Image (cartoon, rainbow, N blue to C red):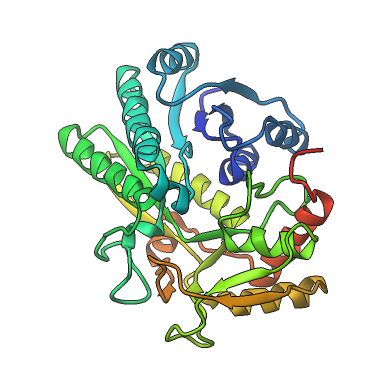
Amino acid sequence: MKNKILVTGGAGYIGSHTCIALHQAGYDIVIYDNLSNSSREAINRVSKLICAPIEFIEGDIRDSDALRQVFAEHQFIGVIHFAGLKAVGESVAKPLMYYNNNVSGTITLLEVMAEYKVKNFVFSSSATVYGDPEILPIDENSPRSCTNPYGQSKLVVEHVLEDLAVSDSNWNLITLRYFNPVGAHASGQIGEDPNDIPNNLMPYISQVAVGKLAKLSIFGNDYPTVDGTGVRDFIHVTDLAAGHVAALKYLEQQTSNIGFMPINLGSGTGSSVLELVTAFAEVTGQNIPYQFAERRAGDIASCYASADKAQSLLGWQAQLSITDMCQDTWRWQSMNPNGYKV
């Protein structure tokens, strides 16, 4: 096929959902993943959902020889790069591991892409690159700064991409800055499957609901927000996946190279932690015991996107509601109480 895409980290949470969206849009996909924080079972389930086999190559983005072999065997029109470590707390404890994987790995991938003249690149970035925002909603021109090595690793890669675009005008580099991805595929077959105690709010809530965890700790109830808890921009993972397809289609439609282009993917509205907990309980009928705890270092009061650029350039906007996010998360969690582990 002429529209073959390499999806690094395609077995992960966002990657697996994006593979379904890519297939539905007519793209041929090859997944490259080292399975360090993902599961081969996710790929099996994606394959069943799309009723087609998926080519999967187990490999590390830091392994240039393995990457060269992949590029030599396939004619890719572009790469969507999800492969990265993403736990904030772990990044503080193990910064070298995060810089090695997220920064060095991306550089190795870009070097091999350059060798094979594949210069369409969609990067999985994060709203953490905005740090503690001065103005809300956050648009793509907002100042960037980071409070932890995870966010810093994403920001360093963005700087690498900016410099690469200046050095060689043949590159098309879209960096998608995600806000807070939640939810699961409507089938309940794939979803977020944390390795250990969840770092993110929604899987923690759903594991309390299913009885795996006793109660939720809400960090801080004295923020200057609607109810004192932190406000975030939650976006359904299915909407996020559609954003990647829209970015690829945008690249294909261009008659000239775009260089480096950052685009926010968010709903454009903020919901508080307490509002999400209440919505989940109401939608699912499950009791969610919670307690308030001290603020965590580095946490900010409010963070939500301006998604105007995504709408005007890509024709994309979030479609699914908080209710959808809660329903789909609970369907996944209740059908798979232990995630992908049987």
- Image coordinates for residue 38, horizontal then vertical, percent: 61, 37
Q: Confirm whether residue 100 shows in the render.
A: yes
Compared with 275, 109 (above or below) is above
- Image coordinates for residue 130, horizontal then vertical, percent: 32, 62
Q: Confirm whether residue 269 shows in the render.
A: no
Taking depth in this image into account, of 218 and 263 the one nearest to the observer is 218
Q: Is residue 138 left or right of residue 19?
A: left
User: Where the N terminus falls, by quadrant?
Assistant: top right
- Image coordinates for residue 277, horizontal then vertical, percent: 66, 74
Residue at 25 percent of width and 32 percent of height? 170
Residue at 51 percent of width and 30 percent of height? 5
- Which quarter of the figure has residue 195? top right
Residue at 65 percent of width and 41 percent of height? 20
- Image coordinates for residue 126, horizontal then vertical, percent: 41, 54
The single residue placed furthest to the left in the displayed view is: 167
Compared with 218, 261 (above or below) is above
Taking depth in this image into account, of 316 and 96 the one nearest to the observer is 96
Taking depth in this image into account, of 238 and 179 the one nearest to the observer is 179
Residue at 60 percent of width and 41 percent of height? 25
User: Where the C terminus falls, by quadrant?
Assistant: top right
